[in-house]
Image (tube, grey):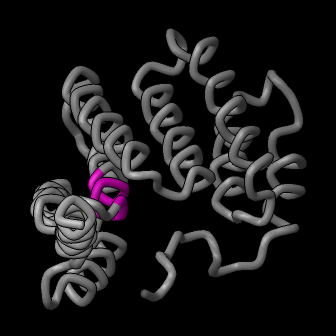
């Protein structure tokens, strides 16, 4: 009987510890929403880096939530796109973005969204040196977006990134504008930005 009571107490303590670990601190949701809005309203690399730091702190405050790592990766990606720095520095931002994305995967984030973001990171890498990287990264973008489409074909961000991939393909490789029009015509405007479900 003592063993049973001890086992029951241990299980109860385990559930209690798990519940404490998954609870987000007070104000966490509001802080995340405000930081996401800031992220979506700026293109300034210095401000983007500050926002990335906020997401990094949010990941520490809520270590079981995948969204801070996702938005940290997204912020680093946008920083790479907006930065006027050299290609090596942009690659460093993208390396950090991939590390944050890997953390979001470990936390079992929405796989379709994570694959789309991975494709977007590949596009950024391609954009650093298109002539040298197009053979490798164009294919990788298509592969991960195909996987994302297999998981959730209704995800409009798939078609945005696919459209970017087609639009920025040199004209000598095909009818990019016709294909872009096909991708984007099927999507509802305003749904191109990922917003986490309300909790």
Going 68% across and 53% down the picture, which residue do you hit?
A: 158
Residue 18 visible in rendering: no
Q: Please indicate whether residue 148 sits to the left or right of residue 60 in the image.
A: right
Q: Quadrant of the N terminus?
A: bottom left
Q: Please indicate whether residue 147 sits to the left or right of residue 17 in the image.
A: right
Going 14% across and 55% down the picture, which residue do you hit?
A: 49
Going 77% across and 30% down the picture, which residue do you hit?
A: 171
Quadrant of res 185: bottom right
| Residue 17 shown in magenta | no
Front position in the image: 127 or 151:
151
Front position in the image: 176 or 138:
138
Q: Position of residue 73 (x, y in %)?
A: 32, 49
Q: Which stretch appears magenta?
A: 66-72
The answer to whether residue 186 is above or below residue 92 is: below
Front position in the image: 197 or 35:
197
Quadrant of res 2: bottom left
Q: Position of residue 61 (x, y in %)?
A: 12, 67
Front position in the image: 38 or 10:
10
What's the magenta bit mostly, secondary-structure-wise? helix
Going 50% across and 9% down the picture, which residue do you hit?
A: 132
The answer to whether residue 10 is above or below residue 35 is: above
Q: Please indicate whether residue 47 sits to the left or right of residue 171 in the image.
A: left
């Amino acid at each position: 009987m003592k063993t049973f009571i001890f086992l029951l107490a241990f299980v109860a303590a385990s559930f209690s510890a798990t519940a404490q670990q998954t609870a987000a601190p007070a104000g966490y949701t509001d802080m995340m929403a405000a930081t996401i809005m800031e992220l979506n309203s700026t293109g300034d690399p210095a401000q983007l880096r500050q926002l990335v730091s906020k997401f990094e702190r949010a990941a520490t405050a809520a270590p079981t939530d995948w969204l801070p790592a996702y938005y940290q990766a997204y912020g680093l990606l946008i920083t790479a796109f907006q930065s006027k720095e050299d290609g090596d520095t942009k690659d460093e931002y993208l390396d950090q973005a991939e590390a944050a994305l890997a953390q979001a995967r470990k936390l079992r984030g929405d796989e379709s969204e994570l694959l789309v973001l991975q494709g977007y990171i590949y596009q950024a890498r391609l954009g650093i040196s298109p002539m040298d990287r197009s053979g490798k990264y164009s294919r990788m973008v298509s592969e991960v977006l195909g996987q994302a489409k297999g998981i959730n074909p209704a995800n409009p961000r798939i078609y945005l990134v696919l459209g970017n991939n087609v639009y920025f393909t040199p004209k000598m490789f095909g009818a990019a504008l016709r294909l872009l029009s096909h991708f984007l015509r099927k999507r509802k405007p305003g749904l191109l930005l990922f917003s986490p479900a309300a909790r």
